[in-house]
Amino acid sequence: MPEKVEYLPFHAINEFMRDDYRLVVISEVLTNQEKIPAEKRTAIGKMIAKFVTVQGFRNSNLAPAGRKAKASVSLFERSPEFVAQIVESWRTLHESLAGAVFSVLTERGWDSLQSLEADRSQFPGFVIHWPKEDTFEVLIIAVHKKAPQLQESDDNVSLMAVWLGNRLPYDLYTQEAEEEKR
């Protein structure tokens, strides 16, 4: 019988993000829309037009990126679809970081990793199991060691690990415990 996989919806990531960093990620995506794939740009634009109100603008998409980002925070906090589109778009803005993090996760034996190019916004959510020995600090050090030329913040490394690994550190487990179950 196959093992049952539990998922958390994408907006559960808000429990693990600082408010200021959440705004940084949304702002970066909305400021760099021309660098984001057209289908992501369209999906984000439709959600903002439908669910976000920016004072002084009938169409919220016409607001400056900073004001639009601030007004989009509440949508990010409650919509798994919006989180998925924003974070997948953010990933495309950090290709070098994505490559380094993917390499580290692969070397550390993270199972069930999809390809680096997979569109994780199409996944059902985050898996709840996170290897206990792979703390954010351990992963950050490994990524900075693997790619010292990257000028990425620790927050960016952590978010990329969460996104590419498709996991949240909700239910920490050790490899030994996992092997005992088998």
Image: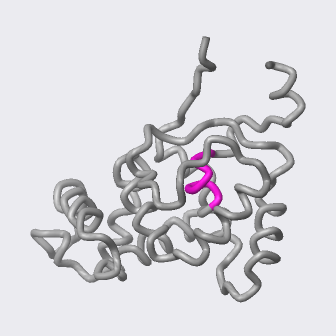
| Foreground of the two, 162 or 105 | 105
Residue 30 falls left or right of residue 92? left
- The residue at 46%/76% (across/down) is 93
- From the viewer's side, name the closer residue of 105 and 77: 105
Residue plotted at (39% across, 74% down): 29
Q: Position of residue 169 (x, y in %)?
A: 70, 44
Is 172 covered by the magenta stretch?
no
Quadrant of the rendered image containing residue 159: bottom right
Question: Between 19 and 26, which is closer to the camera in this rendering?
Answer: 26
- Up the image or down, 148 lies above or below 157; here it is below
Q: Quadrant of the C terminus?
A: top right
> What residue do we see at 59% from left, 20% from top?
4
Check if residue 164 falls in the magenta segment.
yes
Q: How far across and how far down the image is residue 79, in percent?
A: 37, 47
| Vertical order, 131 against 144 (above or below) | above
| Stretch of the chain drawn in magenta | 161-167
